[in-house]
Image (spheres, helix red, strand yellow):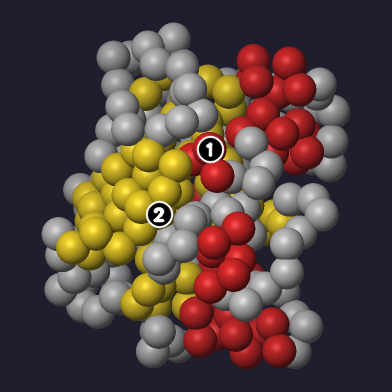
Amino acid sequence: MEMRFLKLQNSNEKISIGNIFCIGKNYLAHIEEMDSKIPEEPVMFTKPASTLRFSGEDIKYPCHTENLHYEGELVLVIGKTLCSGTLEEAEDAIFGYGVGLDMTKRDVQKKLKEKGLPWTFAKSFDDSAVLSEIILKSDYKLTGEENLSLYLNEEMKQNSSVSRMIFKPAEVVKYISERITLHKGDLIFTGTPSGVGSVSKGDKLTVKVDNLPVLETKII
């Protein structure tokens, strides 16, 4: 597979895409709409790097689902190796921020949940992760009060402040680093707010987080 690099604003540095870590159940309103329980610690799953597409690229509607959902998210980019870091070290390891889409086969996920099985094939499939350009922390540091919004064919479907995350960015980075070493180029999708829903072929998705690059993609 051809090596792919993150798209950075205001930088020519080449950073290869590492692991993709995703946090589930990180907004209370989304937990409620999914009729789920509030977690005591971050819920994590992963996606292969090969599933990633960039803003501006079309993504294919996958097979084995009749209910493909969008989930708009804030994405963290790791800039250094971190193993069992402190909160301060975790914050320092965040290199930049992006806007992401975690595409989900909701019908498949429901069946897997009912059987008590992992979500792997509901979350990990071709084009299941989409990422905007990355803004470096040196150019903009997240305040934690930014607004996240998603538009389906220009109609707003998700709208929430990232301040409503149950587990904040540095807490998520610290938690993961205590269980697996993080490396430069790793991505962390931090969870989605309420308002998730289904898409069809031909739909356009736009995801925005205040002061970060916009993500746009089309379902084909």
Which of the marked residues, 2 or 1, is nearer the chain's N terminus?
2
Residue 150, percent across and down? 30, 55
Label 2 Cα neighbours within 10 Å, binned few <14 / some 14-19 / many ≥20: many
Write down the residue under mark 1.
Answer: 163
At 81% from the left edge and 21% from the top edge, which residue is drawn?
A: 86
Q: Is residue 218 left or right of residue 106?
A: left
At 73% from the left edge and 16% from the top edge, which residue is drawn?
A: 88
Q: Nearer the viewer, residue 26 or 23?
A: 26
Residue 34, percent across and down? 57, 74
Which of label 2 and label 1 is nearer to you?
A: 1
Amino acid at pointer 1: Ser
At 35% from the left edge and 58% from the top edge, which residue is drawn?
A: 158
Can residue 5 be seen in the rendering of this structure? no
* Contact, mark 2 vs mark 1 (Cβ under 8 Å): no
Residue 210, percent across and down? 32, 32
The answer to whether 131 is drawn above or below residue 65 in the figure is above
Mark 2 residue element? strand
Amino acid at pointer 2: Gly
At 73% from the left edge and 50% from the top edge, which residue is drawn?
A: 42
Residue reaching furthest to the top = 138
Which quarter of the rendered picture does the C terminus lie within? bottom left
Q: Is residue 35 left or right of residue 199?
A: right
- Can you tell which mark lies on residue 173? none
The answer to whether 18 is drawn above or below residue 136 in the figure is below
Label 1 Cα neighbours within 10 Å, binned few <14 / some 14-19 / many ≥20: some
Write down the residue under mark 2.
Answer: 72
Q: Is residue 71 left or right of residue 30?
A: left
The answer to whether 166 is drawn above or below residue 168 in the figure is below
Q: Which quadrant of the structure image shows residue 132?
A: top left
Can residue 9 be seen in the rendering of this structure? yes
